[in-house]
Amino acid sequence: MTTTVCEDGPMPLRGYLDGFQPSVDASVLIDATPWLDDSLFWPAFLLAPGGSRAAAVAFDADPADVEVYTQQMHQHDSWPVISLDLARGHRLHILFRNFDGDSGWDYLVQPAGSDMAFAAAALEGGFQGPALSWSELVTTASRPDSKHGRAERLLLLLPAVGDCAIPPDAHSVVTAAVTAVGAKHRQDDVARELLNASHRFWGDSDWDDQNGMPVCRGVHSPRHSGTSRYRLALMAEAFGG
């Protein structure tokens, strides 16, 4: 498991890191992008934030090895970050929030040209979300990315999705993505578990249109109707283009 200090910035993620008491030193942030090449990364990621218990078997991985790898992801002295480009220069950071004895996963939006960041979803802990709808997931996953292919982007983003109107073809889309990152067995089971996993955090989520911007009816979503117009517009732009 290779780790490097985050340099793909700007960093630190002010606003987010400063929001803890006491504030978190940015030196704990490490770039986890190289982990995606590890044979155990996808079964571990699809199990932990993803919620798929079939993931280890799907990748021919020993469940004990996956468990050890997952524990290594959550060492409290390092907070791994995987970053994705969004539309209009905005960025998304998937951050492993590794407090000692209290870990989780945060999906942070960093506006273009800013070193500030705010949570669009929090899995474990605050249970904020969802961050985006199914249609926004498909759009965002399909954006050109020099570091991550479409299947990788879709699976990295999927834990932050919540949508009651997921279309019938979603299962086949996720199954294809799971296969593309290396799964050899039970891809259908993994896809089903991934699509149902968001119910762990924020249950069913309906989306409406408010002045041309997607708004989530879920009370735990940072994109609910009471969110500032600026932030609603920013996230609509970042996930929609």
Image (cartoon, helix red, strand yellow):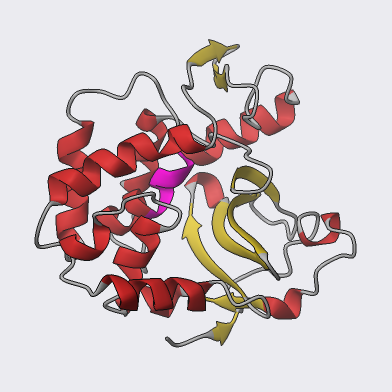
Residue stretch rendered in magenta on the structure? 156-161
* Residue drawn 46% across the image and 22% down it: 204
On the image, the x and y values in percent for residue 94 come to 54, 58
Q: Kindly tell me whether residue 138 is visible in this rendering.
A: no
Nearest the eye: 125 or 212: 125
Snapshot quadrant of residue 103: bottom right
Check the picture and name the quadrant holding the N terminus.
bottom left
Q: How many marks?
A: 0
Nearest the eye: 120 or 213: 120
Q: Is residue 155 above or below residue 72?
A: above
* Residue drawn 9% across the image and 58% down it: 185
User: In the shown orientation, is residue 132 left or right of residue 183?
Assistant: right
* Residue drawn 48% across the image and 22% down it: 205
User: In the shown orientation, is residue 116 left or right of residue 201?
Assistant: right
Q: Is residue 229 above or below residue 235?
A: above
* Residue drawn 32% across the image and 51% down it: 52
